[in-house]
Amino acid sequence: MSFRKVVRQSKFRHVFGQPVKNDQCYEDIRVSRVTWDSTFCAVNPKFLAVIVEASGGGAFLVLPLSKTGRIDKAYPTVCGHTGPVLDIDWCPHNDEVIASGSEDCTVMVWQIPENGLTSPLTEPVVVLEGHTKRVGIIAWHPTARNVLLSAGCDNVVLIWNVGTAEELYRLDSLHPDLIYNVSWNRNGSLFCSACKDKSVRIIDPRRGTLMAEREKAHEGARPMRAIFLADGKVFTTGFSRMSERQLALWDPGARRFCLA
C-alpha cells in the first residue's frame, strides 16, 4: 500500500529569514498610493529612492543608504512633476543621476547632489516630452551612456538621447494594448516586453522590428512581467485562468519561442 506525500519535499522548507533591527530599516515613509503596478522604489550603491505621497504633483525621496531609522516628514524631496510619479530608475553609469516618469506625460532626469538632498529639488536636468498619456515605465540602457527607454499608456515605446533631449527611436505599432513592463537584455541590443494582450515580445529597437513573440505566455487576465536573463532566456511571472501564480522560463532562440 502506498501513501501519497502530503507535503512536497524541499530543501527550503525549514529556511526562515531573520528580520533586521528597526534602526537598520527606513521608517515613516509615506509610499505613494497611486493606482499603478510598480515597485515604487529604486536603489543603487549610494542612494535609495522611494516614490511618496505628494499634494499638488508628484515627488520621490532620495535617501543615502546610511540614513536608516525614522525619516522626518519634512525631509526634502524631488518634486518637479505636476502629476504623480509612476516609475523611477537610477542611471547605471552615474550613481547621482535618476530618471522619473509621471502621469503628467513627461520623463525627467535629475542630478542628485553627491551627499544627498538638503533642500527640495524642483529643477530637472532634462525634460523629455513625447508621450500623449502617462508614462509608467522607465529603463536606462545597460551599456550605452545617456540612452533611456520610456513606455507610456499610449502603448508607445520611446528611446531617448538624454544628452541632447532627442527622440532616437519611436516604436508605436508593436503593442496593441497596455505595456506592463520592459526589460533590456544584457548588452542592450534587444528588449522584451509584457503586454495586456498576454503576449511577450522581443524587439530590436534600432530596426524597430519584432524578433520573436509568444502569445498567451500566461492565460490569466491579471498583469504579468517578463525579464531578460544573462544567458538570453526570458523569465516571466503571471497567472493561470484560475488566478494561480505561474512562473515560466522561455527560450527565444528555440522554434516558436518555447518553454526552456
Image (cartoon, rainbow, N blue to C red):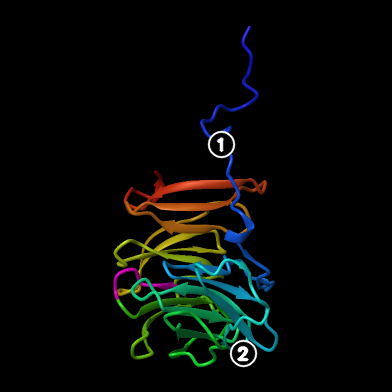
Crowding around mark 2 (Cα neighbors within 10 Å: few <14, some 14 to 19, many 20+) is some
Q: Secondary structure at mark 1?
A: loop
Q: Which mark is residue 82?
A: 2
Three-letter amino acid code at the position of disc 1: Val
Q: In the image, residue 105 lies at what x, y percent?
A: 55, 85
Magenta segment range?
Answer: 139-144
Three-letter amino acid code at the position of disc 2: Thr
Q: Residue at x 52, y 47 (%)?
A: 247
Q: In the image, residue 163 lies at what x, y percent?
A: 34, 88
Whether residue 97 is visible, yes or no, is yes
Closer to the camera in the image, 98 or 27: 27
Specify the principal SS of the magenta part: loop
Disc 2 from disc 1: Cα separation: 45 Å
- Say whether disc 2 or disc 1 marks the residue closer to the N-terminus: 1
Q: Which mark is residue 15?
A: 1
Closer to the camera in the image, 161 or 61: 61
